[in-house]
Image: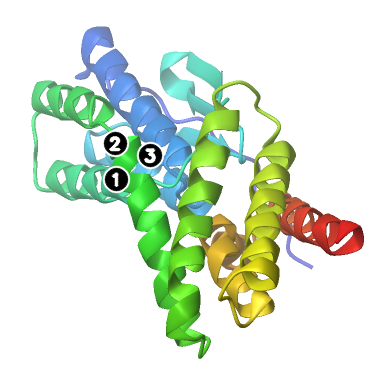
Amino acid sequence: MSVEALETVDKPDVSLDDKFVRKVFYVCLNSGKILLESGAETYRIEDTMLRMANNYGIGNVQVFVTTTVIILSMNDYALSQTIRIEERANNLEKVVNINDLSRQITKGLPIDEAIETIETIHETKMFPLWLVIIAGGIVSAMFLLLFNGTIVDIPIAAFGGMLGVLITESIQRYTKIKFFNEFFASFFIALFSVLYVNYGPGVNVETIIIAAVMPLVPGVLITNAIREMIRGHMLAGTMKGAEASLTAIAIGAGVGLIFMLM
């Protein structure tokens, strides 16, 4: 039976001064932070940070990423830092921009230009709230048609989708407990849907509710959880799967409470 060799610590490259190494550390750490805040997979974050450091000539780099924590160490230069991520969202634009930056670094992008690019990406604004709300309504209306809903149900499905997004975004400003966001959003979606069918021209309350809550469904989170576990990142995959399950329970509880009361 073969015995694996002990870890060896390489001597630092004396041609790299401390200022340059700290700049690389800054780029790697903030790239990972932006990716994690934007909903990227943990294996993608670790791979991107390692590639950036290696392309700038820095080896013996260790990266550990979970859904809320990033630990980066450049062991040869006694640099290590842990950062905690408090807020996360799905911003694929930032993910794509960081990936483009990583490719530019492999082609020889100077470190100072990489820092400027990082700061530009960080300052990228999210879509305005009114546009997100309108998009939620459009998505819900399209899902209603996809589920063979009737034309007369489109207005309430679109209204429910917009209402759900508005409630979720509004509550999120005051509390970090995501359960409340999805619970109250689905509660009011189900309430208006039932009223529309019972006292209005609505036809199929189940189809309306299903279509209206679709913007709340954590599709990206579920996909990432499966991809994490397939890649062997069981901790991150389990945590994301649990978060997605809690969101699904909150949506189901909000809708179920309306059917119990009415």
Front position among marks 1 and 3: 1
- 230 horizontally vs 194: left or right: left
Relative to 34, residue 103 above or below: below
Q: Where is residue 127 shown, x and y percent of the image? A: 28, 40
**Viewer-side residue, 166 vs 107:** 166
Q: Give the amino acid type for the residue marked by disc 1 in the picture.
A: Leu
Q: Residue furthest right?
A: 260
Count residues near mark 1 (Cα–Cα under 10 Å), then give few for <14, some for 14-19, many for 20+: few
Answer yes or no: do the residues labelled 1 and 3 have beta carbons within 8 Å? no
Count residues near mark 3 (Cα–Cα under 10 Å), then give few for <14, some for 14-19, many for 20+: many
Q: Which element type, helix, strand or loop, lies under badge 1?
A: helix
Q: Give the amino acid type for the residue marked by disc 3 in the picture.
A: Met
**Viewer-side residue, 47 vs 121:** 121
**Viewer-side residue, 135 vs 110:** 135
- 136 horizontally vs 128: left or right: right
Residue at the image position 17 percent from the left and 27 percent from the top: 120
Q: Where is residue 209 shown, x and y percent of the image? A: 63, 68
Question: Is tag 2's residue or tag 3's residue first in the polypeptide sequence?
Answer: 3
Quadrant position of residue 97: top left
Relative to 5, residue 88 above or below: above
Image quadrant occupied by the C terminus: bottom right
Answer yes or no: do the residues labelled 2 and 3 have beta carbons within 8 Å? no
- 64 horizontally vs 19: left or right: right
Do we see residue 229 in this rendering? no
Image quadrant occupied by the N terminus: bottom right
Answer yes or no: do the residues labelled 1 and 2 have beta carbons within 8 Å? yes
Residue at the image position 84 percent from the left and 64 percent from the top: 259
Q: Where is residue 34 shown, x and y percent of the image? A: 38, 33
The disc placed on residue 128 is 2
Q: Mark 3 sits on what residue?
A: 49
Q: Mark 1 sits on what residue?
A: 131
